[in-house]
Amino acid sequence: EEASEKHEFQAEVSSLMNILVHSLYSEKEVFLRELLSNAADALDKLHYLSLTEPEKVEKGELAIHIDIDTANNRLVIEDNGIGMTRDELSHALGTIAESGTKRFIQSLRDKEVGASANDLIGQFGVGFYSAFLAAHTVTVETVSYTESEASCHTWESVADTGSYTIAHTPDCGIERGTRITLHLRDDAREYATEYRVKMLVGTYSEFLAFPIYLSTDGKPYDRLNTKPVLWRRQPSDITDEEYNQFFKDTVKDSRQQDPLNWMHFTGEGDVTFSSLVYIPSEAPIHIKEEDKAPSLKVYAKRVFIGADMNGLLPQWASFVRGIIDCDDIDLNVSREMVQGSRQVRAIGRKIVFNLLNRLNKMAQAVDAALIGLEEGEEPQDQDFYTFYFHFAKNLKLGVIQDEARRPKLLNLLRYPSTHAPVARDIIDGRSMVSFEDYVARAPEGQKSIYYAAGENLDALRRSPFLERLTALGVEVLFLTDSLDEYVVQNLRMYTDEDGNNWHFSNVAKEAVDLSFLEEAPTHTLPEGLVALVSNYLLDLLENRKVERVAVSQRLTDSAAVVVSPGLALSANQQRIMRSQTM
Ligand code: ADP
Ligand code: MG
């Protein structure tokens, strides 16, 4: 039997360990994620070999066992993956071979150690050496799948010594795989408690593909990760109940309802990923912003690395809830690759593309369900309007902010109108019109989309501004949301399928042009009389800031209305502004 050999760490390793201990001090818990992800990698490799070289590999149950030894303040993590030979051991745990890792260290060194470096690397992988965040001594016993129990080797290192030892230890009791023992520091005692270990596995590793078993002080093992990794399975093999349950267990926030819909797809090309993204059926009840569940959790090969990263989703799409699991994001060394990166943006684009298509399909499903319905019958599929009731504001925000997706978002907007039946209690497909439908049924020659804006739908329906338009059969949309007028003003025009531009025209403003209906004025007044009445009214309204009084053709029943000049704020906008400054 060979004696224990002592080796110096490669300089980069020492400096990495130094940086870790100083800058990641407050986030030392990441060590468990790193060690579990290494164990899962080793199991993955063995699983692969069992498929390619079944004659050489006796697989058994591939699993990870965690043992807590409270008396000795120790944590043991053991896998039956591929293990390491002596050479592999000293190479893997003594050097940093990857050039990417070297760059990572370099960029960390350039940062000031402290909070900023902490922010940068906190949520990303730092690898095996993070074990020293929690342990003063780390012991690794390992048997390669190419060898037998008799060739077990033990690697051991004490923090801050800059060196490690390797010894041949044939009686280590491992058939195949790797056992890592962390001799925890006094200030890391919490990691030798069942509660803390369960919590960390739940946060970072609940979806690892292999079972994780936990035992405390020799008690029987408990399995920790029992939730299925739904997103890696074939959609055709998953029932709606499973999708609903997964949403409730994993991605929702304060909501209890089943989701409305979901998109389960994989992306290939620029970046490879699986994703499962839900459209919730209700808006969360927000008590505090920090209570909000993340829109999208991001996993790298099933290990949680972060949520709602920069560049992933536009603000308007933040109502979705789901998971992205990316194969191309390396857990180690990847922070600059992740936040706001090309990959993240590419993933985001694919998700938004699918989301808009799905919403569009949902909207079409309502339209289809409406065809052939008898009066009084309710269409079956109203999902789109359930969505709209909760999230219309998100779509409108998108129209304002997201120019690239504007046309698709616009086609999802729906408004009540003079031509749609009055809704009973909640909005539905019959009582709402899209811009598309509006322009399709407008009379020949009409070039504007007419709207009335106000806070109260009933009051709008009774508005004298509608009299003449209604009499002539011109449809008017009712805009009752505080964002609506900003949307139409921001747009100024709607472009229809044939490329025609339609201006938005507020019926409460001057100059509603109805000349396309080719109606001559029904009556004319002598000019002297007009002047007389105008002057009388101007006198009467002396203190009320009326700019001018004019004769118009816009009314049929009412005698007079107050209108705003074309460029001024409408009465509704003034109301909204007043309510915002209060
Ligand atoms: P990475 O996982 O990104 O390669 P780590 O620092 O986490 O970097 O691990 C370094 C190397 O150590 C791994 O690439 C692997 O070769 C080896 N290793 C670590 N843990 C295990 C394990 N449980 N079983 C087998 N090999 C391991
Ligand atoms: Mg690793």
Image (spheres, rainbow, N blue to C red):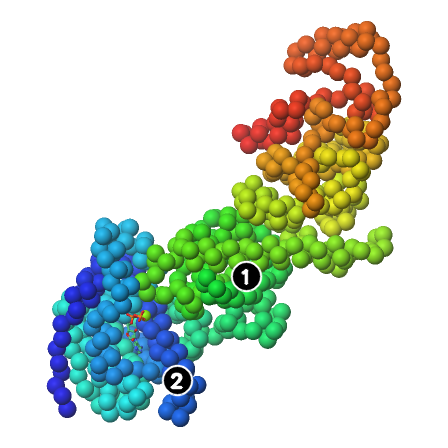
Q: Quadrant of the N terminus?
A: bottom left
Seen at 56% across and 41% down, the residue is: 400
Q: Residue furthest right?
A: 522
> Between 211 and 183, which is closer to the camera in this rendering?
211
Left or right: 459 with respect to 96?
right
Q: Is mark 1 within 8 Å of ligand 2?
A: no
Corner quadrant of residue 82: bottom left
**Figure check: 572 above or below 391:** above
- Element under disc 1: strand
Seen at 36% across and 65% down, the residue is: 331
Residue 9 x %, y %: 16, 70
Corner quadrant of residue 26: bottom left
Seen at 42% across and 55% down, the residue is: 342
Specify the quarter for ligand 2: bottom left
| Numbered tag placed on residue 398 in the rendering | none
Mark in front: 1 vs 2: 2
Residue 8 x %, y %: 13, 72
The crowd level at tag 2 (other Cα within 10 Å; few <14, some 14-19, many 20+) is some
**Figure check: 245 above or below 451:** below
Seen at 76% across and 44% down, the residue is: 440
**Figure check: 394 above or below 189:** above
The crowd level at tag 1 (other Cα within 10 Å; few <14, some 14-19, many 20+) is many
Of label 1 and label 2, which has the lower sequence position?
2
- Tell me if I can see residue 182 in this picture: yes
Q: Mark 2 belongs to which amino acid?
A: Leu
Write down the residue under mark 2.
49
Write down the residue under mark 1.
277
Q: Mark 1 belongs to which amino acid?
A: Val
Marks 1/2: CA distance?
33 Å
Q: Quadrant of the C terminus?
A: top right
- Element under disc 2: helix
